[in-house]
Image (cartoon, grey):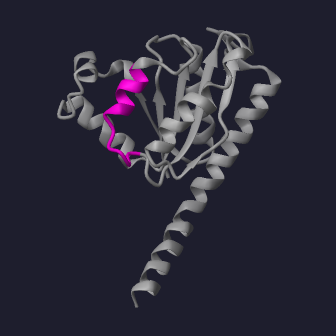
Amino acid sequence: MSVLLLGGSPSVASSGARLLQHVGDKLTLHGHRCNTLQVRDLPAQALLHASFDDPAIVRATALLLDADAIVIATPVYKASYTGILKAFLDLLPQDGLDGKLVLPLATGGSQSHMLVLDYALRPVLASLSARFILPGIYATSDQLRWNAATGLTLDAPIAARVARGVEQLSSELFALPQRRLQAQHARHSLAA
C-alpha cells in the first residue's frame, strides 16, 4: 500500500515537516511505501494561477491520485491551514481523495489552534471525497523538540497519539485490499 506524505508548510525546517517525516518513518517500519510531496516545491506561478496543465502540477496530482492514503501536515497560520496547501487542494479534481484514507497533522504555537483540524481542514478533505479521515493529530512546538544530533523528540502524549494514528492507518491500509475485493463481489452480485 502506498502513502503520500503531503507537506503544506512554506518553511523547509518546520516542526510540521519533521512530524510528517516521523510519521512516514513509522509507516515504513509497518511495511508501507511512502512518497513525499512538499507543496512549497511546486511552482508558485502554477499554484497561484491554477495551472492544471503545468507538468509539475500534473505529476503532483498523479502522485496523490495513485496513493492509497494521504498523511497531510500543515502549520496553523491565522487560525487555519496554510494558503499554499489550499492552493494545491484547489487544483485537485472534486473527488481527488475518493477512496483514500487520510491522516491529518497540524502544528502550532499553542493549544488554542487545535480545532483547526476539525473546523478548517476536515471539511475540505471531506469535500474531496476522502473515504475515511482518521482523528487528527495536533502538536505544539513545545511538544516537538528538534536536535540536529538526536532528531525529533515527541512529548509522551503526542508520541502516544502518533503511535495510535500510525497503527490505525496501517491497519486500515492492510484491510483495503479485502474491502475492495468485497465491494467488487457485491457489484458483480448486483449486476447478475
Which range of residues does the magenta coloring cover? 84-96
> Which quadrant of the structure image shows residue 166?
top right
Q: How many marks?
A: 0
Q: Residue at x 55, y 67 (%)?
A: 179
Is 94 on the left or on the right of 82, as rendered?
left
In depth, the one of 7 and 83 nearer the eye is 83
In the figure, 51 relative to 48: above or below? Answer: below
Q: Residue at x 22, y 34 (%)?
A: 52
Q: Residue at x 24, y 27 (%)?
A: 50
Q: Position of residue 151 (x, y in %)?
A: 64, 16
Q: Position of residue 189 (x, y in %)?
A: 46, 86
- Does the stretch in magenta take in 59? no
Task: Evaluate whether residue 22 shows in this view.
Answer: no
In the figure, 182 relative to 46: above or below? Answer: below
Q: Residue at x 74, y 41 (%)?
A: 164
Give the residue furthest to the bottom: 192
> Which quadrant of the structure image shows residue 111?
top right
Q: Position of residue 78 (x, y in %)?
A: 54, 11
Q: Quadrant of the C terminus?
A: bottom left
> Which quadrant of the structure image shows residue 39?
top left
